[in-house]
Amino acid sequence: MKYLNLVTLALVIIGGLNWGLVGLFGFDLVAAIFGAGSILARIVYILVGASAVWQLVPFMAALKGDGTSATVGGR
């Protein structure tokens, strides 16, 4: 599970950086790499979205304060 948390966290960070580029400069890095509207770009967007949903699990655990750490993987 720790590996999955690391991968999903990395994808969420990538997605956040991409949205920052879109907001600041109107530049979509994912579309620039894979082609706007391409199936590969759509897969990346889907994986980033699914990763954000997955990262809700440790986020909610941290909000509940149930003794788990807010760090990736918990301890």
Image (cartoon, helix red, strand yellow):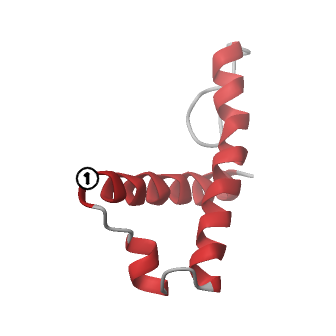
Based on the displayed image, in which of its 4 quarters is residue 21 positioned?
Answer: bottom left
Picture residue at 67% right of the left edge, 65% below the top? 46
The one of 37 and 17 positioned closer to us in this rendering:
37
Residue visible at 72% across and 47% down in the picture? 54
Asked whether 73 or 43 is in front, the reply is 43
Amino acid carrying label 1: it is Leu
Percent coordinates x, y for residue 8 in the rendering: 62, 56
Residue 32 pos. (x, y %): 39, 81
Q: Secondary structure at mark 1?
A: helix
Q: Quadrant of residue 56?
A: top right
Total number of numbered discs in the rendering: 1
Q: Residues within 10 Å of mark 1 (few under 14, many from 20)?
A: few
Residue 75 visible? The answer is: no
Residue 57 falls left or right of residue 22? right
Which of 51 and 34 lies nearest the eye of the viewer?
34
Please give the name of the residue rendered at 45% of the width and 74% of the height, measured from the top-left corner: 30
